[in-house]
Amino acid sequence: MLLIANNWWAFLIRGILALIFGIVALFFPAAAFLALVFVFGAFAFFDGIFALVAAFTSNAKSENWWWLILEGVVGLGIGLLTIFQPAAMGEAWLILIAAWAIITGILEIITAFRLRKIIVGEFWLILGGVLSLVFGLAVAFYPQAGAFAIGLLIGLYAILFGVIFVALGLKLRSFARALQES
């Protein structure tokens, strides 16, 4: 514990950086969403490279190595598409989020109606389903608002994370000082 307490400043710096990022994301939520799209694109690209490396350097070639090649090519394609067409990838993400929310909402409402004879309080599941459905439709019809909302959530998360890590850094600093004094 002493070692981590002596590095209190690292937690404080992480917290301050997260606060700065969070505030910037709140003022520029579309840029925060776009950054998330780029990180995903980089992941897909490098994952594709390593899938291809695994496929072509495998000693035991089996029928499954073709799946690795396909996985690698798809990963490289998505990564390159993200680099050259980030807006299109961001829009694709929003379409997937909207479809997921709509399908989830419909299934939650159906489940609630089927469970109404068995449980009490199915209203909450219906309400959750309606909320998911409305959110999905809003993102589908207003994708810019969906990107904005996701950017805001990233900003809020970063601010909360920053506050917690600043508090942790300050707490560790007090703990380190107390240990040095004793």
Image: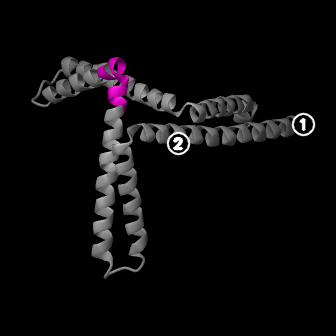
Q: Amino acid at mark 2?
A: Leu
The answer to whether any part of residue 122 appears in the image is yes
Per the image, label 1 sits on a secondary structure element best described as: helix
Q: Position of residue 11 (x, y in %)?
A: 68, 33
73 horizontally vs 14: left or right:
left
Q: Position of residue 3 (x, y in %)?
A: 71, 32
Mark 2 or mark 1, whichever is nearer to me: 2
Q: Can residue 45 be found in the magenta stretch? A: no
Where, by quadrant of the figure, is residue 163 drawn?
top right
Q: Identify the magenta region.
A: 81-90
Q: Mark 2 or 1 closer to N-term?
A: 2
Seen in the picture, residue 38 relative to 97 is either above or below; the reply is above
Q: Quickly name the residue at label 2.
A: 153
Classify the position of the N terminus by image quarter.
Answer: top right
Q: Amino acid at mark 1?
A: Glu
Q: Quickly name the residue at label 1.
A: 181
Q: Are marks 2 and 1 in contact (CB under 8 Å)?
A: no
Where, by quadrant of the figure, is residue 170 drawn?
top right
- Report the front residue among 135 and 78: 135
Residue drawn at x 27%, y 74% is 114
Name the colour scheme.
one colour
Per the image, label 2 sits on a secondary structure element best described as: helix
